Image (cartoon, rainbow, N blue to C red):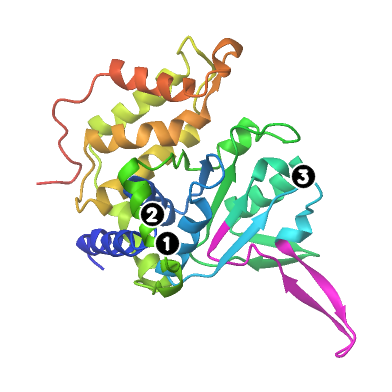
Amino acid sequence: MSLSKISQTADRIRSNVSKVIVGKEDIVDKLIIAILTSGHVLLEDVPGTGKTLLAKALAKSIDGAFKRIQFTPDLLPSDLTGIHFYNQKVAEFEFRPGPLFANIVLADEINRATPRTQSSLLECMEERQVSIDGTTHTLGRPFLVIATQNPIEQQGTFPLPEAQLDRFLFKIKMGYPTTEEGISIMKRFMADSPLEQLEPVIGAEEIEAAKQLYTTIQVSEELLGYMLAIVEATRVHPDAALGASPRSSQALLRACQAHAAIKGRGYVLPDDVKAMAVPVLAHRIALRSVQRMRPEAAEQVIGSILASVSVPADSPLVGRT
C-alpha cells in the first residue's frame, strides 16, 4: 500500500459514513486517525447527538464487529472481558468472551462505572489483550474504544482521573447540527434508517497495512521542536496545575503523522500540529481550581499556547531531497 492509498482509504470511509451521519467530517477524520494510530477516543456530549450512530456507521464501513456497553455502577470487569464457565455437556470449562472482543467498542457513559471497572477497560485499551484465570486472550485488530460521557449530569458519576484520561488519544465533542444539517437529518431518517443499507468499503487487512505505513510520514527537526515546545508550555502555563506528560508529545506526533497521511501528504506541516493540538492535549492537562469550572477552559489554554509559541518559518523534511 502506498501513502496515497491511505488518503483514498480515508475518503472511502468518510464518504460511506456520510451516508448516515450529516456533517461531522472533522469528527470522522479523528476517528480514522485514532484507528490508524491504535488510539482511542473520548466523546463528551449530551445524549441524542449521534454518538452511537456514528460508531455503528464506522464499524459497518470497515467491516468490523461492533459492541455497545452501557456503563452502570454495578457493571463488573468480567462483564467486559468475559468469563470461564463450566459446560456440563462437555464436562470442561469454556471461555465466554465479553463485549470487548470486537473491533469498535462503544463504552457508553464510562464515568458511571466504578473506578475498578474503568481501570479494567483502560488496561485492555493499552495492552490490546485481557488475562483471565491465567490465560491471555488477544483482542481484535483493529481495536477502537469510543467512550462517551455526559458533561451535564454529574450526579452519581466517577470522573476519570488524569492518569486514565491520558490513555485517550482524543477528547472531542459532537456538537449540535446546524439548521441545514438538522433538516437534512430529518429528511434522511424520514422513511427508514440509512444505517441498515450501509455496506463495508474496506477490510481489516487494508487498515492494518495503513497502520504500518503512516509512521513513514516525515517530520522535520523544526516541527518536532515545535510540538515539544507546545507540550512543555502546558507545564508552565499559569492556569495549569499539571501539564501534559511525555506520552502527550508522542500522541501528538502520531496524530500529526496520521492527519498528514489522510490528507494525502508524505510530510507533516505546522497546520497538522495546530489541527491536532487541542483534541490531543486539552484533556491531558489539569487546571487550577479557579479555571476548572469553565467548560472550555482547557481548550482555551491550548489555544493561547498555540498563539504564543513561534511557528517554524521553514521546515525542511528529514530525509527529503
Q: CA distance from mark 2 to mark 1?
A: 6 Å
Name the residue carrying label 2.
Answer: 185
Quadrant of the image for the N terminus? bottom left
Location of residue 108 in the rendering, given as x and y in whole percent from the top left corner: 62, 50
Q: Earlier in the sequence, mark 2 or mark 3?
A: 3
Neighbour tally class for label 1: few under 14, some 14-19, many 20 plus, Cα within 10 Å? few
Location of residue 285 in the rendering, given as x and y in whole percent from the top left corner: 52, 25
Kindly give the residue lying farthest to the bottom in the view shown.
89
Vertical position of residue 42 compared to residue 310: above or below: below
Location of residue 59 in the rendering, given as x and y in whole percent from the top left corner: 47, 65
> What span is in magenta?
81-105
Which residue corresponds to the image point at 74% horizontal and 40% vertical from the top-left?
Answer: 115
Q: How many marks?
A: 3
Which residue corresponds to the image point at 78% horizontal and 59% vertical from the top-left?
Answer: 78
Q: CA distance from mark 1 to mark 3?
A: 39 Å
Amino acid, disc 2: Ile
Tell whether label 1 touches label 2 (CB within 8 Å). Answer: yes
Vertical position of residue 246 compared to residue 287: above or below: below
